């Protein structure tokens, strides 16, 4: 009897709850990488309501720690932090994360024209005198052009149209580089951009270099390829870089972040709000929307009304670099020992799959200890191996490591391979690049809001494009548009 009396009341309560209007957040943020989380951080501090929607089942985007079988971890995404990367340094300090220097004591390895040699650690490997002089001349020429770049709006630079008509490769040709000099320049380009020199607009390349600084320190090519003395690879984060995202998400409150929530559509609902539709058909509403994604990925979302032609063309013409990592884990960091040559773990090669390597061991005293060598898989080499098995990758990288560091490189206890090209919600990395004509014709659309629709992502940063710092800066900028609007 009691249950029958309660039933109408329960139905009324259910109907009442169902009839309540859907919450309209101040902002819906699409993407829980560092750009999206950066936007959420600023909005939270301003007292705004927000919801972050992330397609993956984790936060961090292309920042990812991978646990190892015997304990510890390795970093398969963004890994290094450098001087003038103020926003990421500030965030690490705010979250109580410590930094430690990337290992750089000893000699580097150069493998060129089938011969192995070692040299005192420096950004530019010494080859023959003419080639070395040519490489230094090219770097000086790049640095001399950088002050002419308008960092905030590079498409407005005085020589923007001239620079944007040619590729970086075409700009290099008048230098008449020797084979050895060209190898070193190409190795640097692949390591920095994860594409080949003929894929880059000269304007884009110069902008990227100009962005490798801050409001008081101009960017230089040297900083991008250096470890010590303020280089972009100077420090690592104790606990792994993904802790930047994980700890920030916890601070924001996990109830403000929805994982496994890929977005399919952003539509203007009325004059004051947008409806964001997820792939499962559910919807959320926001007065503003921040699309915190690389332009090629943002293109996969349907927008109603359609975005301006400039934004549409921008997302169609920019494309992701090709990048991955192969990491060999060992019992000890034996390459550092005198018996093995007192090596840094860094090698530069003109052949093989592993063209650029680093010591990826965790800081001394880490429990459990982790000793590792890492190679970037980039540009044409990564694209060649995208369709091969992990076993084929580790076999080739293992051969390369043995060539550079000796037979002890074969005593691997665990391999870790990450191919960002094959990640559905990355499709490459570390950044989307622009070819000739893209910046001058469509560049402003990188960060130009459309109504209350805002765009973030490391590509739209003024400083440190392609880096974690640039991602954070772009998120802070998008949030400021909302807060100040």
Image (cartoon, rainbow, N blue to C red):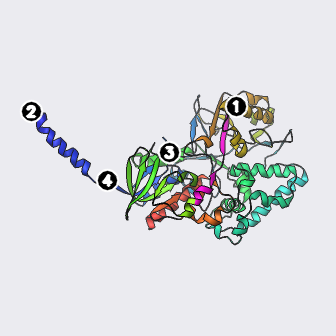
Residue depicted at 69% across the width and 34% down the height:
393
Q: CA distance from mark 1 to mark 4?
A: 51 Å
Residue depicted at 58% across the width and 66% down the height:
444
Residue for badge 1: 392
Q: Does 306 sit left or right of 205 as displayed?
A: left
Q: Secondary structure at mark 1?
A: helix
Q: CA distance from mark 3 to mark 2?
A: 51 Å
Crowd class of label 3 (few under 14; some 14 to 19; many from 20; radius 10 Å): many
Residue for badge 4: 22
| Residue 314 among those drawn in magenta | yes
Q: CA distance from mark 1 to mark 3?
A: 30 Å
Tell me the tag on residue 59: 3
In this view, 365 is above or below 293: above
Magenta span of residues: 313-327
> Looking at the image, is mark 4 or mark 2 earlier in the sequence?
2
Q: CA distance from mark 2 to mark 1?
A: 71 Å
Residue for badge 2: 1
């Amino acid at each position: 009897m009691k249950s029958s009396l309660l039933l109408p009341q329960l139905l009324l309560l259910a109907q009442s709850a169902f009839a309540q209007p859907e919450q309209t957040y101040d902002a819906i943020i699409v993407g829980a990488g560092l750009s999206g989380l950066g936007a959420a951080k600023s909005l939270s501090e301003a007292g705004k309501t927000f919801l972050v929607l992330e397609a993956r089942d984790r936060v961090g985007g292309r920042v990812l720690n991978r646990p190892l079988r015997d304990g510890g971890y390795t970093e398969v995404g963004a890994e290094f932090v450098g001087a003038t990367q103020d926003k990421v340094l500030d965030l690490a300090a705010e979250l109580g994360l410590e930094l430690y220097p990337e290992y750089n004591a000893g000699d580097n390895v150069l493998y060129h024209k089938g011969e192995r040699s070692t040299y005192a650690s420096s950004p530019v490997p010494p080859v023959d005198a003419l080639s070395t002089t040519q490489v230094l001349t090219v770097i000086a020429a790049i640095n001399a052009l950088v002050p002419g770049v308008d960092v905030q709006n590079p498409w407005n630079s005085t020589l923007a149209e001239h620079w944007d008509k040619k590729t970086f490769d075409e700009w290099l040709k008048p230098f008449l580089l020797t084979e050895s000099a060209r190898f070193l320049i190409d190795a640097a380009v692949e390591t920095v951009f994860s594409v080949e020199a003929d894929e880059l607009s000269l304007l884009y390349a110069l902008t990227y270099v100009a962005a490798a600084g801050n409001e008081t320190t101009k960017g230089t090519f040297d900083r991008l390829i250096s470890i010590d003395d303020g280089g972009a690879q100077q420090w690592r984060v104790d606990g792994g870089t993904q802790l930047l995202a994980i700890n920030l998400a916890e601070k924001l409150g996990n109830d403000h972040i929805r994982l496994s929530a890929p977005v399919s559509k952003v539509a203007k609902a009325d004059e004051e709000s947008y409806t964001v539709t997820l792939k499962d058909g559910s919807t959320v509403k926001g007065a503003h929307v921040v699309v915190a994604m690389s332009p090629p990925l943002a293109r996969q979302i349907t927008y109603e009304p359609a975005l301006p032609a400039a934004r549409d063309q921008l997302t169609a013409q920019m494309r992701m670099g090709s990048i991955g990592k192969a990491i060999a884990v060992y019992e000890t960091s034996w390459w550092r020992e005198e018996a093995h040559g007192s090596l840094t773990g860094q090698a530069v090669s003109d052949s093989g799959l592993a063209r650029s390597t680093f010591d990826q061991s965790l800081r001394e005293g880490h429990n459990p200890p982790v000793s590792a060598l890492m190679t970037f898989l980039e540009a044409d080499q990564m694209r060649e191996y995208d369709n091969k098995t992990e076993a084929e990758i580790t076999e080739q990288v293992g051969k390369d490591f043995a060539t550079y560091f000796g037979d002890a490189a074969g005593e691997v206890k665990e391999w870790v391979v990450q191919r960002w090209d094959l990640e559905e919600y990355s499709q490459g990395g570390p950044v989307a690049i622009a070819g000739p004509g893209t910046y001058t014709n469509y560049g402003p659309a990188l960060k130009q809001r459309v109504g209350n629709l805002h765009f973030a992502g490391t590509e739209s940063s003024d400083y440190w494009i392609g880096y974690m710092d640039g991602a954070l800066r772009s998120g802070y900028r998008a949030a400021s548009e909302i807060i100040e609007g």
